[in-house]
């Protein structure tokens, strides 16, 4: 079904109650013989957000929070077990299944974290960057393809002469740029970036982030930026969503989130980041560790580590409500306790 | 007297295509009880420095020049057996991956007690008592029970605490920590660096903290050495190096790090990349990328020289040349 | 072509080859054997299977250096007057042909199934793995015997080429399992790598991903296995021929020659069986050594 939904002007991507459950049960034979139960992992448990055209939404969180899974849901690598996501008014997952899905894939692309694994080591750069063009039949003439690939490489700060080389001849930062060139080949509107600079050195990271910002400005790109590094997020995003164990706990625009974080987890995260310049503020050490996602706590999943926990937190899962212009899932905030 | 003195250390890797000089004339000291940070990007040689000090350089890498002195005595030229006694007793090590730092087949207690008994002349009962006390000090609750657990029964952060306990078990004077928090979540990272700092101060152990994360250095260390292409670019008290960097590389690095407290349109970028070991330019290794380069930089290699409150290997601070610094 | 060869020579693998005397010697020996067998028509002093050139009076002559031998037949003759040296070359041709053909088919079949199983997973994977387990529980020789025997029973008046075909198929059916399992394992690893995911995001069809992205990256171990399996296939074929269900006497392989000569072993005419045996050992050994070298040479890069 590709019925157009009514969307507010300028919203390109809309996710509604997205959920993804993985079956990590032991094999059938083991379950029968050893009597082991089925194991289900709720990697993403009801996530909703909107991204406006030309803007960047950043999703942050620690391991097991599900942000990478959300990224893969949005590019069609996984199919959600619940919920849907709308792209430019269309139901994207329904579209992916149809032949028209290929059109959609031209408009949504992804950049991955590991610069060493995201390029096929046996292909030359020219083929890697040119593959999307060939696959979608956008350019069939060999010479024209070469020219176009050269242009793409130039737009990310590399040279067309790098085309016949192999990935291993480039550094991590250069490989990430090749990934970006590949992602831009079909002139997409929406780029999902899964920790694109986490594996890079600081100075290289600066180069890649600057390029990404320039490209966004020049081409009106919309980004979903996944990261665990809040400082990087501060630099690139317009809106920030904080995730914990598969749920969104806070979603606000950047200025508000960093100036006055509301959710206890967001506050702890911001507090925990080692600061380069001494602010002289006393630090409240964070308690505990992220629990096992296979066996999450009841109610609000953050309650074992929260300094403001009460009985309601242990029993009832908080909804993502809009309070003072910020979306937040916390009983304590809702009850005005903090 | 300094606890650790590294003098003009040179480490080379002979290979099929020629010999690569991975560490080129490194010199620094660590005072007793001090926390020295060694920061740099990949390929700068910081992990190699740690490995050379512990005596765990992977062959064919080897020390070809310079000296390493621990409490005034040379340790770089010791035989394997002699080094084995120093390692653990006088120098402890913490590595990046807590999962592979512990033997999965032995309980945590067995590994701690074995280390204590190997290096300290105590009875088994006393060793066990010390092991439990170590675990408690590193923040592991119910230590008496948990001492019988295997590594896989601990979570990532807990495991790293056990690794810290293991490093401190034989009461070493120096701990070499190579990226101890990189594999951990942000909230755990904060706990671990606080623990490392407090427990080392408490037990009087000096720490050489190797990392690429400047924020961790800022929170933990007393002094910091910035490495580039196998050389030390700048060394000095932490807040001086961060707030008033004297070397253009350090300056560029600080400006490239996104800061969570301020909003910036563009991050400063240092164009180009760190040179590969077989393509280090003559003179100062940073000269092709340096915004303040001048003639001398391409010809003569600068040694560390006083530059305000720190020492930097940069001709801009050459007192004799009269160039503005 | 020349630049590709010179690049290969200068590469890490070329270096490893140049510095390994065993690999170079094995390669030279293997090349000589292959050359002689392929060009047997030109290289062999006689054609032992052209009945018009045979002289029964020259039967059972010992090798040239023994008493009674002649330089016309360097390694002696068999019971029908066939020159052993020439028979070796023609026999090696059959052995090598069967060996390479069966390995080629095993590779195509095994790699194909392994790719499918690793890529799609699920019940396809489970079914294939169970099939592999079943096949591995049968000893290879017995399976080959069974198929060859059944083949003969079904086509009692079969032409010799059919006999060779049945032989090849029976060896293929016992050899494909290793490739399937290895490739399946490698495919599982590669499938989760980000370059495959990038191709999926772009919309490349699964078939094309398997063929153009995954396949080149999983072929390394296959190459090593195939090299070593050529030797195994040749020996399996020799065993089958020795047992009488392999290559027929009219186009004998080395195994057939060994069998023929076996009857004369105890009457003192040792050369009829020993030389084919030595040739068999030489070919298998050199191919095996090449395979060993290849595995070690590829290993550090795979790490």
Image: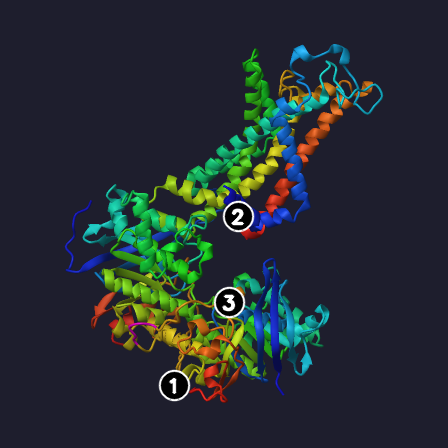
* Picture layout, residue B301 above or below residue C186: below
Disc 3 chain ID: B
- C-alpha distance separating marks 1 and 2: 60 Å
Q: Quadrant of residue C227?
A: top right
Q: Residues within 10 Å of mark 3 (few under 14, many from 20)?
A: some
Q: Give the numbered dot on residue C179.
A: none
**Any part of residue C20 in sight:** yes
Q: Check disc 1 and report the residue beneath it.
A: A280
Q: Depth check: give the residue in front, C72 or C63.
A: C72
Q: Which mark is residue C7?
A: 2
Residue A40 percent location from the top left of the image: 39, 52
**Which residues lie in the magenta part?**
B263-267
Instruction: Inspect the magenta stretch and tell me whether residue B265 lies in it.
Output: yes
Which image quadrant is residue C275 in? Answer: top right
- Magenta span: predominant SS is loop
Instruction: Write the residue at 28% across / 53% down.
Output: A108
Q: Is residue C203 left or right of residue B195?
A: left
**Where residue A233 sits in the image (x, y, percent)?**
33, 69
Which of the labelled discs sits on residue B43, or is there none?
3
């Amino acid at each position: 079904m590709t019925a157009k939904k009514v969307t507010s002007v300028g919203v390109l991507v809309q996710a509604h109650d997205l959920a993804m459950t993985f079956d990590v049960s032991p094999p059938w034979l083991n379950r029968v013989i050893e009597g082991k139960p089925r194991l289900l992992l709720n990697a993403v448990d009801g996530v909703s957000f909107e991204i406006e055209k030309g803007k960047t939404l950043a999703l942050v969180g620690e391991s097991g929070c599900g942000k990478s899974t959300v990224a893969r849901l949005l590019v069609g690598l996984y199919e959600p077990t619940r919920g849907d996501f709308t792209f430019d008014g269309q139901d994207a997952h329904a579209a992916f299944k149809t032949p028209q899905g290929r059109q959609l894939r031209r408009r949504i692309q992804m950049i991955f974290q590991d610069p060493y694994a995201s390029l096929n080591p046996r292909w030359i750069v020219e083929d890697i960057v040119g593959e999307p063009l060939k696959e979608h039949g956008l350019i069939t003439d060999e010479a024209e393809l070469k020219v176009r690939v050269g242009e793409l490489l130039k737009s990310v700060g590399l040279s067309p002469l790098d085309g016949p080389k192999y990935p291993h001849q480039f550094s991590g930062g250069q490989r990430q740029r090749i990934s970006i060139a590949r992602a831009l080949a079909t002139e997409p509107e929406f780029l999902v970036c899964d920790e694109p600079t986490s594996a890079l050195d600081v100075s290289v990271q600066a180069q890649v982030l600057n390029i990404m910002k320039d490209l966004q400005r020049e081409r009106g790109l919309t980004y979903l930026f996944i990261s665990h590094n809040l400082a990087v997020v501060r630099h690139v995003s317009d809106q920030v969503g904080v995730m914990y164990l598969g749920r969104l706990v806070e979603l606000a625009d950047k200025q508000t989130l960093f100036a006055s974080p509301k959710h206890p987890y967001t506050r702890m995260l911001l507090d925990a980041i080692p600061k380069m310049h001494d602010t002289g503020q006393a630090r409240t050490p964070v308690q505990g560790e992220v629990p096992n996602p296979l066996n999450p706590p009841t109610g609000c999943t953050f309650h074992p580590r929260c300094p403001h926990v009460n009985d309601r937190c242990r029993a009832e899962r908080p909804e993502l409500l809009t309070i003072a212009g910020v979306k937040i899932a916390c009983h304590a905030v809702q009850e005005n306790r903090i | 007297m300094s606890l650790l003195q590294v003098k003009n250390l040179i480490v080379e890797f002979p290979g099929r295509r020629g010999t690569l000089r991975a560490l080129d004339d490194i010199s620094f000291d660590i005072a007793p009880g001090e926390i020295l940070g060694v920061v740099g990007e990949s390929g700068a040689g910081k992990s190699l420095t740690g490995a050379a000090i512990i005596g765990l350089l992977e062959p064919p890498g080897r020390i070809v020049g310079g000296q390493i002195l621990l409490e005034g005595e040379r340790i770089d030229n010791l035989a394997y057996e002699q080094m084995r006694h120093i390692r653990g007793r006088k120098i402890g090590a913490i590595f990046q991956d807590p999962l592979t730092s512990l033997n999965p087949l032995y309980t945590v207690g067995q590994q701690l007690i074995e280390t204590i008994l190997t290096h300290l002349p105590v009875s088994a009962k006393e060793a066990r008592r010390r092991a439990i006390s170590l675990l408690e000090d590193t923040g592991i609750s119910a230590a008496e029970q948990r001492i019988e657990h295997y590594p896989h029964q601990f979570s990532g952060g807990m495991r790293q605490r056990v690794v810290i306990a293991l490093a401190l078990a034989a009461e070493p004077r120096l701990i070499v920590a190579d990226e101890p928090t990189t594999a951990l979540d942000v909230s755990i990272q904060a706990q671990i660096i606080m623990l490392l700092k407090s427990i080392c101060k408490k037990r009087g152990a000096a720490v050489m903290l190797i990392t690429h994360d400047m924020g961790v250095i800022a929170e933990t260390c007393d002094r910091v050495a910035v490495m580039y292409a196998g050389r030390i670019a700048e060394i000095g008290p932490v807040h001086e190096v961060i707030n008033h960097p004297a070397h253009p590389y350090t300056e560029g690095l600080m400006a490239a790090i996104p800061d969570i407290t301020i909003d910036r349109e563009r991050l400063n970028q240092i164009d180009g990349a760190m040179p590969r070991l077989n393509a280090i330019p003559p003179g100062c290794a940073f000269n092709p990328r340096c915004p303040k380069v001048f003639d001398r930089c391409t010809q003569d290699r600068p040694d560390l020289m006083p530059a305000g409150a720190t020492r930097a290997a940069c001709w801009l601070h050459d007192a004799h040349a009269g160039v503005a610094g | 072509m020349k630049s590709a060869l010179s690049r290969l020579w200068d590469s890490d693998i070329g270096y490893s080859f140049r510095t390994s005397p065993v690999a170079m010697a094995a390669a030279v020996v293997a090349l000589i054997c292959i050359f002689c067998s392929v060009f047997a028509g030109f290289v062999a002093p006689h054609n032992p299977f052209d009945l018009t050139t045979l002289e029964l009076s020259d039967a059972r002559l010992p090798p040239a250096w023994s008493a009674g031998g002649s330089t016309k037949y360097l390694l002696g003759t068999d019971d029908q007057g066939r020159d052993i040296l020439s028979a070796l070359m023609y026999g090696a041709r059959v052995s090598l042909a069967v060996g390479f053909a069966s390995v080629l088919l095993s590779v195509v079949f095994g790699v194909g199934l392994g790719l499918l199983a690793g890529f799609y997973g699920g019940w396809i994977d489970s079914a294939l793995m169970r099939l592999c387990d079943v096949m591995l529980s049968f000893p290879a020789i017995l399976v080959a015997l069974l198929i060859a025997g059944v083949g003969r029973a079904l086509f009692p008046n079969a032409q010799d080429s059919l006999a060779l075909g049945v032989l090849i198929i029976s060896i293929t059916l016992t050899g494909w399992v290793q490739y399937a399992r290895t490739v399946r394992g490698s495919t599982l690893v590669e499938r989760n790598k980000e370059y495959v995911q990038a191709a999926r995001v772009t919309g490349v069809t699964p078939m094309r991903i398997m063929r153009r992205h995954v396949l080149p990256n999983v072929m390394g171990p296959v190459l090593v296995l195939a090299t070593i399996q050529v030797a195994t296939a040749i020996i399996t074929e020799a065993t089958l021929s020795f047992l009488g269900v392999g290559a027929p006497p009219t186009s004998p392989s080395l195994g057939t020659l060994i069998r023929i000569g076996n009857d004369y072993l105890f009457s003192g005419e040792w050369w009829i069986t020993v030389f084919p045996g030595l040739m068999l050992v030489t070919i298998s050994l050199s191919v095996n050594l090449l395979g060993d070298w290849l595995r070690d040479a590829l290993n550090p890069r795979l790490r």
